[in-house]
């Protein structure tokens, strides 16, 4: 049986990336390192990754896409592109949580894992996971929350047990007063790369092997935070009453 080729994309924040994988081997990665909008950057980046890998889009077996949480515009551009490719080429899609792509890199063998990254506006996107053997099971919903409140929420969920913390943006929590108690327990935040597409691709491969995938019609985003347009519109509507 030929190796599975996966095209992985992450457009959840300004530090997005694209990767092409052949099974566990990462053939090419390209990071979004400019101010260019994803609407103009993504397609050329995908083309460059495929060309460098010696592949055409027709040869891609599946797509792994970060479906959130993250920027409304970024996630929308990424998922819209993946939906279009899936419809044209008839290939499956795996929707991957960007937070899960962080959580799987948490060090140690603690029962609990807390993953987060910068959501701007003095908030973080975060999720809390419980280890079940080699698997991670999310406890509660993904959230957008003040950093100190996220630390408190994770501590409350863990009920006195140790937590492994992992993030692309450790600085978001380490200056918080709530963090001091975790630090005194010997906990620290494991800093990982903001280039998430390779890990998103690996999680996509694992899901495909288990028969967990979707199609263009069923693919949905998890923005967590409402779009600015929705927030501002509702704010004006309330103010005008």
Image (cartoon, rainbow, N blue to C red):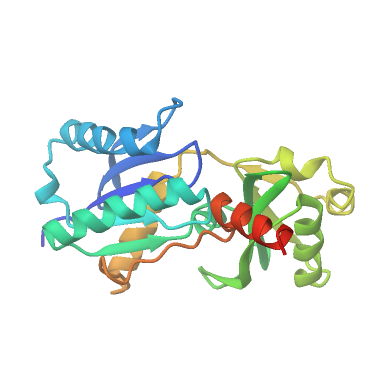
- Counting from the top left corner in percent of width and height, residue 221 is at 43, 62
Is residue 6 left or right of 184 when viewed as pictured? left
- Counting from the top left corner in percent of width and height, residue 89 is at 12, 57
Residue placed at 36% from the left, 49% from the top? 78
In front: 71, or 33? Answer: 71
- Counting from the top left corner in percent of width and height, residue 159 is at 81, 72
Q: Quadrant of the C terminus?
A: bottom right
In front: 10, or 180? Answer: 10
Tell me how many marks there are: 0
Residue placed at 70% from the left, 46% from the top? 189
Please indicate, yes or no, whether residue 12 appears anywhere in the rendered image: yes
Q: What is the residue that sits farthest to the top in this orientation?
A: 34
Q: Say if 55 sits above or below 103 in the image.
A: above
In front: 173, or 162? Answer: 173
In front: 103, or 46? Answer: 46
Occupied quadrant, residue 103? bottom right
Occupied quadrant, residue 208? bottom left
Residue placed at 82% from the left, 61% from the top? 152
- Counting from the top left corner in percent of width and height, residue 109 is at 64, 61
Q: Say if 103 sits above or below 57 in the image.
A: below
Please indicate, yes or no, whether residue 115 appears anywhere in the rendered image: no
Q: Say if 113 sits above or below 78 in the image.
A: below
Q: Quadrant of the N terminus?
A: bottom left
Q: What is the residue that sits farthest to the front in this orientation?
A: 241
Residue placed at 70% from the left, 62% from the top? 238
Is residue 106 left or right of 37 when viewed as pictured? right
Q: Say if 203 sits above or below 170 in the image.
A: below
């Amino acid at each position: 049986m030929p190796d599975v080729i996966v095209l992985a994309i992450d457009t959840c924040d300004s530090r997005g990336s694209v990767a092409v994988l052949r099974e566990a081997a990462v053939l090419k990665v390209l990071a979004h390192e400019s101010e260019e909008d994803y609407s103009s950057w993504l397609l050329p980046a995908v083309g460059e990754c495929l060309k460098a890998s010696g592949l055409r889009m027709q040869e891609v077996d599946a797509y792994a896409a970060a479906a959130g949480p993250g920027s409304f515009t970024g996630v929308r551009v990424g998922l819209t592109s993946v939906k279009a490719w899936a419809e044209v080429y008839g290939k499956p899609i795996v929707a991957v949580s960007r937070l899960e792509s962080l959580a799987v890199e948490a060090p140690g063998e603690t029962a609990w894992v807390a993953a987060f990254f910068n959501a701007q506006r003095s908030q973080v996107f975060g999720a809390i996971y419980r280890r079940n053997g080699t698997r991670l099971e999310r406890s509660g919903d993904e959230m957008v929350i003040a950093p100190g409140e996220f630390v408190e929420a994770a501590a409350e969920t863990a009920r006195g047990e140790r937590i492994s913390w992992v993030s692309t943006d450790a600085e978001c929590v380490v200056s918080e007063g709530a963090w001091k108690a975790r630090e005194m327990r010997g906990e620290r935040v494991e800093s990982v790369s903001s280039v998430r597409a390779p890990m998103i691709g690996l999680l996509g491969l694992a899901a495909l092997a288990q028969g967990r995938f979707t199609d263009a019609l069923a693919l949905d985003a998890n923005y967590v935070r409402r779009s600015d347009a929705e927030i501002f519109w509702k704010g004006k509507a309330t103010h005008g009453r």
